[in-house]
Amino acid sequence: MDKSKRKAVIAGNWKMNKTPKEAAALLDELAPLVRNANCGVVVCPPYVGLAVALEKTAGTGIGVGAQNVHFEKSGAFTGEIAAGMLAEMGLTHAIVGHSERRQYFGETDETVNKRAKAAVEAGLTAIVCVGENLTEREQGVTVDLVRLQTKIALLGFSAEEMQMVIIAYEPVWAIGTGRTATADQAEEVCAAIRAQLAELYGQDVADSVTIQYGGSMNAQNAEELLAKPNVDGGLIGGASLKPADFAAIVKAASR
Ligand code: PGA
């Protein structure tokens, strides 16, 4: 497996944490720590922190992403933000289909597909989240389920558009629980996602897509997870709020 065909990307999902002022302070601390990163680095603060994040990361090489996008370009969708609005601000990425969105906000595979498509059409790289919950893992359906989630999320995507897609494998039982998937579990599912991509787009495209692992990835376990042939990066929640820890993960991905 030739990992040089794709970029390692470490993205921080700040979730509903950090006010704009706190975001500015975090980025002031983080930027110098990841200056020599040899991988993609992205931060995804809450919407209200995006402007200050763009200001603080200007010229640093750190990308800024949103945690969600709406699928319509504009209209009567109170409380929602269109992908084009975010792209115009200067954002580079958007997380789509995070399990918390699926769990608490009625996100389905179909809406994930629509949101991912809108993000890519607006010029944002979509970080598309897939993953099983604990019951599904115990039922032994993880690989089938994640392959299906991936397939539906990518309906209507051309091979060319796949260059604007990152898949994040995030087992729901590992998110925010301190219970990380073992490196072998992460590899098994990330490999299955790549096999699904190969089935849809051919091996060359599949080999060029970044597949992240997310779920309690931290400074201690990152190296082992990222050493796996199909784990190309991480989507980091809790540890992305601690600059030193996030920088250590970035360093592990830069090796
Ligand atoms: P965690 O969150 O690192 O806190 O487990 C990961 C995520 O939800 O993206």
Image (spheres, rainbow, N blue to C red):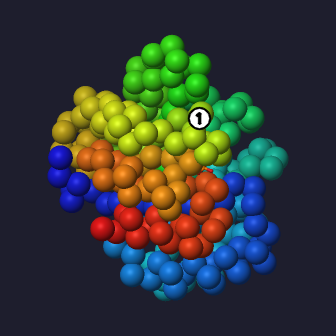
Question: Where, by quadrant of the figure, is residue 194 drawn?
Answer: top left
The answer, for residue 210, to whether it is visible in the render is no
Mark 1 CB near ligand 1 (8 Å cut): no
Q: Is residue 230 visible?
A: yes
> In the picture provided, is 50 more to the left or to the right than 31?
right
> Label 1, on which residue?
172
Which is nearer the eye, 112 or 157? 112
In the image, residue 147 sits, relative to residue 157, either above or below, namely above
Which percent across, then down, holds residue 14?
Answer: 66, 59
Please provide percent x and percent y for residue 22.
76, 75
Task: Pick whichever, 52 or 154, lies toward us.
Answer: 52
Q: Secondary structure at mark 1?
A: helix
Amino acid at the residue labelled 1 = Val
Circle 1 packing at 10 Å, graded few (<14), some (14-19), many (20+), is many
Q: Quadrant of the C terminus?
A: bottom left
The residue positioned 65% from the left and 65% from the top of the image is 241
Seen in the image, is 1 located left or right of residue 107?
Answer: left
User: Picture quarter containing residue 159?
Assistant: top left
Residue lying at 27% horizontally and 32% vertically, measured from the top left: 195
